[in-house]
Image (cartoon, rainbow, N blue to C red):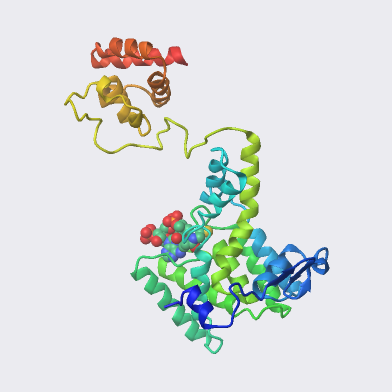
Amino acid sequence: MTPSALAQFRSSDEAWWQTAISRNEPNLIEIRGYPVQELIGRLSFTDLIALLAIGRLLSDGERRILDAALVAGADHGPRAPSIAAARMAVTCGVTFNSAVATGINLLGDYHGGAVEGFMELLSDLAGPSMSDEERRSAARQLVASFRERREPVPGFGHQLHDRDPRRARMIALLEEAVDDGTIRGVYLGTALTIEAALADAVGRELPLNVDGLTGIVYLELGFPAEVAQGLFSLSRGAGIVAHALEERLAGARIKGPCPPGDELVRYVGPPPRSLTSSSSSADASYSREFWSTFGEDGICVYWGLSREGLEQLDALTRRRLVRFTNDVAYGDEEERDTLLAEVAGLADNDRAAALRRLVSDDA
Ligand SMILES: CC(C)(COP(=O)(O)OP(=O)(O)OC[C@H]1O[C@@H](n2cnc3c(N)ncnc32)[C@H](O)[C@@H]1OP(=O)(O)O)[C@@H](O)C(=O)NCCC(=O)NCCS
């Protein structure tokens, strides 16, 4: 068990905060022993990341591939949950840094955070003394064990791309770095061996994704797996900041995961019911809580329309009806009661026709 910080402090002669990274005293800032004023203007941000995290300066070749990894992961548009979450957060009025943190916090095992698990398994498999055949056999076993557990091998596959444009470019850069002696290439070779074993096992290609590609770079440069999600956060953080800014400048408030009334949200729980009455009339079903989850089934209950009645309406009219109903539900109470009473008195067919008319008036 890890000792408590207090126990560790009491049983050693270490300071409460002991760091080998930086020294900060009045009028003095040093990073890994270098005065900060020497670093400013000489080091790129990529150099600084390496100096801070692993305590050494990069060669030109190393900087090139670390830079490439940071660029590769920076953005994937609002399709990426991390980006969409930050954009949503910014429209909710939270502070800008909180919106950025919201995006970063979505990086998990299946999205952006697979890099750590990938690096761990790659480290286990990349023993320098292994022959190629031993490595191939170990890769086959690794893939088989993931498939037995019905778990995806981290670092491979993508929801959107089957030919991710980042893969070929990153592999080419890594191969160049092997050729010019910048890196040894053991991790690159092992990753490609796993990729081939996975394709054989699944029967189609599941190429290295950005987590895998960047994980190879981090390992080749000597970063430990524990820091990988942090590096990815720095990279994706740049994209998240830009998207959050764009959304903020667009100025809209409260952007949810999908527009209200959209058929993407479907309530599948029990129909509206009451603790005090068994009535399922449209009136009894009205409640604000209900409106937060309603969909087409909710529309049926609200207007007292059967499913068949609703299906007489085309998709556009149905969508308009959801929007219209929302307006009615939140609108003037007297108008709402009049409309409900008018429609409630009609037979199903007439009811659908009346609703169609109401909605086209609305449109
Ligand atoms: C990214 C990911 C979630 C995409 O999943 P997806 O959209 O379901 O992927 P696909 O539709 O291309 O593939 C579905 C099939 O391939 C399999 N598959 C996909 N990625 C796989 C992987 N990395 N290892 C093993 N099998 C995988 C799935 O199990 C599924 O098989 P099934 O149809 O027999 O159930 C998935 O590839 C994954 O979990 N990868 C590992 C995690 C990772 O690296 N995430 C970072 C993404 S940038």
Q: Position of residue 197 (x, y in %)?
A: 46, 73
Query: Can you name the residue that lies furthest to the bottom here?
Result: 129
348 up-or-down from 139: above or below: above
Looking at the picture, tell me which residue is in the foreground, 102 or 124: 102
Query: Can you name the residue that lies furthest to the left here?
Result: 278
Q: Is residue 58 left or right of residue 121?
A: right
Q: Quadrant of residue 317?
A: top left
Q: Position of residue 337 (x, y in %)?
A: 32, 13
131 up-or-down from 93: above or below: below
Q: Position of residue 103 (x, y in %)?
A: 55, 50
Residue 318 appears in the figure: yes
User: In the rendered picture of this protein, how many numbered marks are placed on residues?
Assistant: 0
Q: Is residue 32 left or right of residue 288?
A: right
Q: Residue at x 41, y 70 (%)?
A: 201
Q: Is residue 156 left or right of residue 301?
A: right
Q: Quadrant of residue 305?
A: top left
Q: Position of residue 196 (x, y in %)?
A: 50, 72
Quadrant placement of the N terminus: bottom left
Looking at the picture, tell me which residue is in the foreground, 260 or 284: 284
Looking at the picture, tell me which residue is in the foreground, 198 or 49: 49
Question: In which of the image's four quarters is ligand 1 placed?
Answer: bottom left
Q: Quadrant of residue 306?
A: top left
Q: Residue at x 80, y 68 (%)?
A: 39
Q: Residue at x 54, y 73 (%)?
A: 191
274 up-or-down from 269: above or below: above
Residue 311 appears in the figure: no
